[in-house]
Image (cartoon, rainbow, N blue to C red):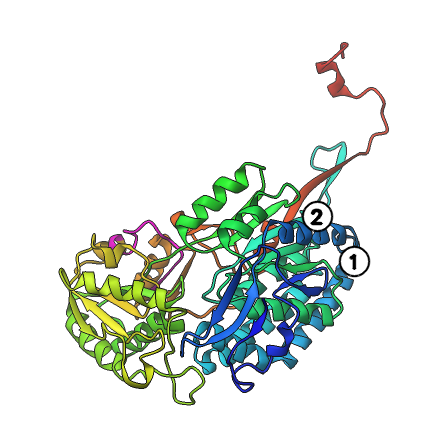
Amino acid sequence: MHNPGNATPDRFPAQDRFADGAQYIAGRLTKGTSGRTHTVVDPATGEEVLTYELAGPDDVDAAVAAAREAFPGWAGATPGERSDALHRFAAVLAERAEDFARAESLQCGKPLKLTREFDVPGTVDNAAFFAGAARHLQGQSAGEYSGDHTSYVRREPIGVVGSIAPWNYPLQMAAWKILPAIAAGNTIVLKPAEITPLTSLMFAQAATEAGIPDGVINIVSGTGREAGEHLVAHPDVAMTSFTGSTAVGKRVAEVATATVKRLHLELGGKAPFLVFDDADLDAAVHGAVAGALINTGQDCTAATRAYVQRPLYEAFVEQTAALMDTVRVGDPFGPGTDLGPLVSHVQRDRVAAFVDRARAYARVVCGGEAPQGDLKDGAYYRPTLIADAAQDSEVVQSEIFGPVLVVLPFDTDDEGIRLANDTPYGLAASAWSRDVYRANRATREIKAGCVWVNDHIPIISEMPHGGYRASGFGKDMSAYSFEEYTQVKHVMFDNTAVAAKDWHRTVFGDR
């Protein structure tokens, strides 16, 4: 059963692209064979967008087989040929920018200004970056390190990559998984979240139209338990890349290790936002609200724990609450909307439960409720500020993944840095200070894969993204991502042309 939903053409201009199903295997759309369906829902209205047949194990097998068949030809292409294909891909993405923006806003509830100005341009830039990076897969330069041999390093593709992407940034996560993998010469099967498959499918279609060969990029839209686990366990998949929660990441690691796969995990976060007493208070307040509320707080790097040195604490709480109250919650397609709904009513209710439990031990300064009126049918939740929670409390230690910022005071710099490091996570953080020595100390001592100074959230294609500790390991974006998606091979040539070499005496004979 494959049914279009109720989305109007202005909200979903690309709807006709899904008439043949929601699996993309060997260059064409097909229907899933699991026997079950899933409905994509517009979280702003609760209305059906698309009902499609979910992928089952047979679809995963077909996608992996397509990727395996395409691998020799794609891996054997020259770096220049792969680069040219990716440049064409970037151009097609740019031409379709508005379609991508609207589809992403529709399935996720993101304000259109966010998808137009962040998600889609970032994805196009990623494609352009990896088009250039495809030509720069160098290893260590050749040299005579032993004296009798010339050594050099080759970087070679791994094979078929099986990737699983989350629902919070479906388009960008598809790009982060697919682009470095194929730039390095691998082929890939991507499983997007079943609730947000639209832009991943559009991404693969655009790749085909750009001339990337069939089977290089395949999409299976199914559940994690069925399609995801089968993909990770598949014996023909040489590497697994997963972005999602730490709990699910542990399960992915268990399944992947059974077949000794390369593993890349980008997991949860609980980013600290450390404000020293010499910081520009106005800048810190604006940064906290933007950093906490981007994508309705559904961002692993979002500012979630603001630690503010005591002289600025009360003013920070007051000004942050006042600024949060000016944020306009509304229809993602509305021209004046700042904050859209969460991705689903299930996620909205999960966030609300965190806040409701916190009322017993902390102070909800603003927000803390779902709006009513015209927004009552959507998965909306007001921007929320919580103060006076204990460091070991749930809202400080656990990933809420919603528009919620918790603020705590600290006294000394030592205490602030200690508190910033006092969760299991280590994905991102920021430090706010006018003192370069103070800020530099924070960048050294905060245990996170990214530390911003006097800002929070910006990312760029040229720099790596990935975490420490329970936030996983491995890097997305940047040239460092090739370390994830390539094998390193040492090649050594004998230069002596001597049959009986001196080292042979350690095995037989005398000098």
Q: Residue furthest bottom?
A: 335
Q: Which of 134 and 392 is in front in this view?
A: 392
Q: Nearer the viewer, residue 166 or 34?
A: 34
Q: Residue visible at 40% across and 72% down?
A: 295
Residue 413 disc label: none
Residue 375 appears in which quarter of the rendering? bottom left
Provide residue 153's location: percent of width, then percent of height.
Answer: 70, 44
What's drawn in magenta, residue-wise? 418-430
Disc 1 element: loop
Q: Say which amino acid is labelled 2.
A: Glu
Provide residue 70's location: percent of width, then percent of height.
Answer: 75, 54
Q: Nearer the viewer, residue 271 or 365?
A: 365
Evaluate if marks 2 and 1 touch, with contact meaning CB atoms under 8 Å apart: no
Q: Is residue 461 visible?
A: no
Provide residue 378's location: percent of width, then percent of height.
Answer: 36, 77
Residue 487 appears in which quarter of the rendering? top right
Q: Which residue lies furthest to the top in this view?
A: 509
Q: Can residue 209 be seen in this view?
A: yes
Q: Any magenta on residue 494? A: no
Residue indicated by mark 1: 78
- Of callouts 2 and 1, the N-terminal one: 1
Disc 2 element: strand
Residue indicated by mark 2: 156
